[in-house]
Image (cartoon, rainbow, N blue to C red):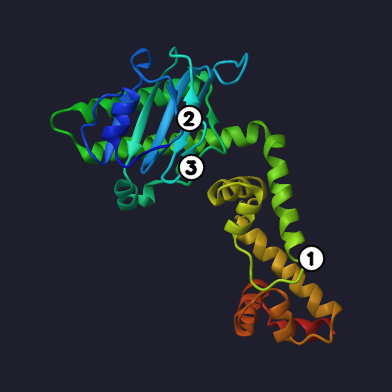
Amino acid sequence: MKHFTDFKPYNEYLGLNEPLDNDIDVGFYDPPNMLSKSEPISVDFYRISIKINLVNKTTPKSEPITAVFFNSPNLIVPAGWDVEPTYKGMYLQLSKKFIEENRYLFKTYLDYGQHEALYLTDEEVEEISAVFKLMTKYYESEKRNFNVLLSYVNVVVSLVEAFYKRQFSTDPKQYNHIVTDFQQSIIDYYNQPVSQLPNVQYFADKLGLTANYLGDIVKHFTQKSALENIHDYVIKRAKELLVENQKLNTTEVAYELGFEYPNYFSKFFKKQVGLSPKEYRQQLN
């Protein structure tokens, strides 16, 4: 497997133009002069790649697709790729330093990895292509203006956000099962003895997804974050234990739910319900 730590060797490997900067690289694909078949690779930076009418030769009789793809550090493309050199497209590459210094501008899509390509309509292709043309103009200018470049990067990310919301809403059946599996996983977790509170990453790992991808789908369809969904179930389970098992004191209920410190459970419960566990039990009694 090949691993690339920065843009230059990666661009040389693919047959792309040499980057003009170590933290941001923008360009258009030239497939006839590029590597169309690759071994498994990984990169130590972020990539947003738009490919128009891409045909994957590893999928028999596959239809051309137009989509946005993402690569992030530590993501391995295990099969590499084998594509027809007939597509068009553009790419934006960002270093980890660039992302960290401007984290407030970026959504979670850069970490989606291979879980979810973003399929584009013709109108969306026109929109994002226009932004790339302007961004490339400022990138290739001798007097490179990074504030303008940063603004265009933000526009690209904002467009991607809007396009994803459209995709989530267009085919809800494709995503509803993820929400259902997530909620069932929470129930399954508490149907066994627990030693700690679960987090979003735990359920993402169980479902074979990234935490960001799972969180965005859950938020889109439930209007609550994945963590809020977990907390809602913990409160529901806490109320059941407080009411149905009067022999358990508050400390024992806290341990049953996976809280390490009973005081934290009491504060958490009061914040969510408006009453302490003891007050809640007394009120019902």
Question: Number of callouts in the render?
Answer: 3
Of the pair 202 and 263, the residue shown nearer to us:
202
Q: Quick one: quadrant of the C terminus?
A: bottom right
Measure the alpha-carbon separation of dots 1 and 3. 33 Å
Measure the alpha-carbon separation of dots 1 and 2. 41 Å
Discs 1/2, front: 2
Q: Residue furthest left?
A: 142
Q: Quick one: quadrant of the N terminus?
A: top left
Left or right: where 187 falls relative to 129: right
First in sequence: mark 1 vs mark 2: 2
Of the pair 60 and 169, the residue shown nearer to us:
60
Badge 2 is on which residue? Answer: 80
Left or right: where 77 falls relative to 45: right
Discs 3/2, front: 2
Amino acid identity at mark 3: Tyr
Measure the alpha-carbon separation of dots 3 and 2. 21 Å
Of the pair 265 and 203, the residue shown nearer to us:
203
First in sequence: mark 1 vs mark 3: 3
In this rendering, the answer to whether 157 lies above or below 197 is: above
> Which label number is shown at residue 228?
none
Mark 3 secondary-structure assignment: helix
> Which label number is shown at residue 109?
3
**Residue 169 locus on image (x, y percent):** 64, 35
Badge 1 is on which residue? Answer: 191
Q: Residue at x 30, y 46 (%)?
A: 98
